[in-house]
Image: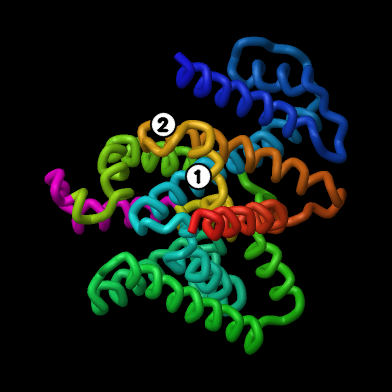
Amino acid sequence: MLWTLIVLGGFAALAVSILIAVTLGPADISPVNVRDVLLNHLGLTDVPVRVSKNAIVWEERLPRALVAAACGAGLGICGVIMQSLLRNPLADPFVLGISSGASTGAVIVGVLGVGGAALGLSGGAFLGSLVAFGLVLLLARMSGGSNDRVILAGVASTQLFSALTSFVIFAFADSDETRGVMFWLLGSLEGVRWDDVTLCAIVVLAGAAVCLYFAYVLDAFSFGDDVAASLGIAVAKVRMLLLVVTALITATLVSVAGAIGFVGLVLPHAARFLVGPRHSRLVPATALLGAVFMVWVDAISRVAFAPTPLPVGVGTALIGVPAFIVILSRRRSVR
């Protein structure tokens, strides 16, 4: 009963958060305007709404809020998977070097023009993420494939692609290109559209379904590979599958919204405090908490320095770094 109330409360909080977020911004949009626009597009009413307000709500703010929710949910789920598979409470989705690979891919397209209009920044970022993940898997397999080796391979990949990104910008980018790419790399939801909403929603929902299906496996991994193997789990195959799911979710979200850090690191710990360590509850709780968190971070980042929006990745870092320090302090006190 309590779990049901928590889930229903989470969905209600998410719906209210999105509604409020859509009203925030330089243009005056009331909750009544949002309601009328939504009901009109759903075909339930035909209330006259000014064209400008309809465009702001339906074409700009609502897709942005929904993508923010998808990013928070998806990165939170990836954090849960990484911390369980690697048995490291400080692991997050970007430990596999995916963010750095996405940055390099975006810079190659944006600065060098490789792929041009056929790819765009998002397409380049997605391909760069997959290349980085492939390199991590290759390095980890060459060195034995243990959890520690995966982390070390991720660190090496991160450093490599960060250096490549800096080199391309330093050697080939002019000031305008550098400014545009760097703003995107800091995390930005500017200009997202319904196509992005559809893509992010499908990937995150599919990833969440896979994680819930393997919830008992994630519980076993939390106690180590030997325990998981003793329960009849194909440790290597399942770990690879879940790592691939994590990579695809992260690569998709980074390709749409840029690098958004600390969500996958901090939110799983907050969810564990609320619902405990069982992954059948931890995964949906983290997804809901991450969605609500990101909607509010994006809304505040959008209006804090209006009319110039603060990159959402900066907002998550400002909140995530203090939380990260708290986690480190708790680990030290436990030891």
**Residue beneath the point at 50% across and 54% down:** 334
**Residue beneath the point at 46% across and 21% down:** 3
241 inside magenta stretch: yes
**Residue beneath the point at 78% across and 17% down:** 32
Say which residue label 1 marks. Answer: 268
Say which residue label 2 marks. Answer: 281
Q: Is residue 261 above or below residue 5?
A: below
Front position in the image: 181 or 232? 232
Q: Of the residues under marks 1 and 2, which one precedes in the sequence? A: 1
Give amino acid for label 1: Pro
- Residue 111: image quadrant is bottom right
Q: Is residue 34 visible?
A: yes
Answer left or right for 166 relative to 204.
right
Disc number placed over residue 299 in the picture, else none: none
Tell me which segment is drawn in magenta. Answer: 229-249
Separation of disc 1 and disc 2 at Cα?
A: 11 Å
Front position in the image: 242 or 24? 242
